[in-house]
Amino acid sequence: MTAKYTHLSTMVMVQYKQETSKEVKITGPTDRVYEKVDLDTVIYIKDREIFSVSRHTFEDVVIWNPHIAGAASMGDFDPKDGWKNMACLFLG
């Protein structure tokens, strides 16, 4: 992300947190709603442009990653260490 955003984390309990970095760091199971994100947003992972999101509606963006335990618990998540190189992005 290119600016500071408030995100809503739904992994344990609903709680709002203020991002203090331009980077989204995935250090555990992640299911975050970023509110009022710029309509033209570029998502980077490890300094590589992964997504360029341009839209006319839907100000919110959800980023999801199951991390180790979540990937292991899904029978169809393959390869099991694939969580290290992925981020699922939803608009809405």
Image (cartoon, grey):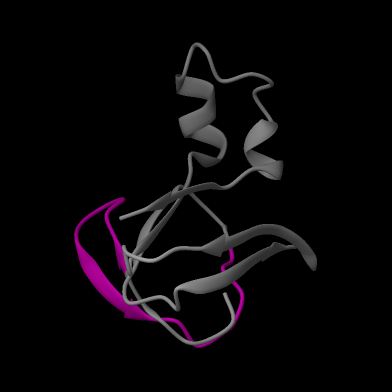
Q: Residue at x 37, y 59 (%)?
A: 32
Split into 4 quadrants, where in the image is the C terminus?
bottom left
Q: Nearer the viewer, residue 69 or 87?
A: 87
> Residue 72 placed where, x, y %?
53, 23
Q: Position of residue 22 (x, y in %)?
A: 59, 82
Q: Is residue 20 magenta?
A: yes
Task: Count up the numbered dots.
Answer: 0
Of all residues, the one furthest to the top in this rendering is 75
Q: Residue at x 25, y 74 (%)?
A: 16
The picture quadrant where one finds residue 80 is: top right
- Looking at the rendering, the stretch of residues picked out in magenta corresponds to 8-25
Depth check: 13 or 47 in front? 47
Q: Residue at point 55% right, 61% down?
A: 53
Magenta region includes residue 76: no
Residue that protrudes farthest toward the front in the picture: 56
Q: Which residue corresponds to the image point at 31% horizontal and 50% vertical from the top-left?
A: 11
Q: Is residue 66 above or below residue 36?
A: above
Residue 88 placement, left or right of 91: right
- Relative to 74, residue 14 above or below: below
Left/right of residue 41 with respect to residue 50 in the rendered view:
left
User: Which of the two residues, 76 or 55, is positioned nearer the viewer here?
Assistant: 55
Relative to 31, residue 68 above or below: above
Image coordinates for residue 79, horizontal then vertical, percent: 69, 21
Q: Quadrant of residue 67?
A: top right
Q: Quadrant of the N terminus?
A: bottom right
12 vs 48, nearest the viewer? 48
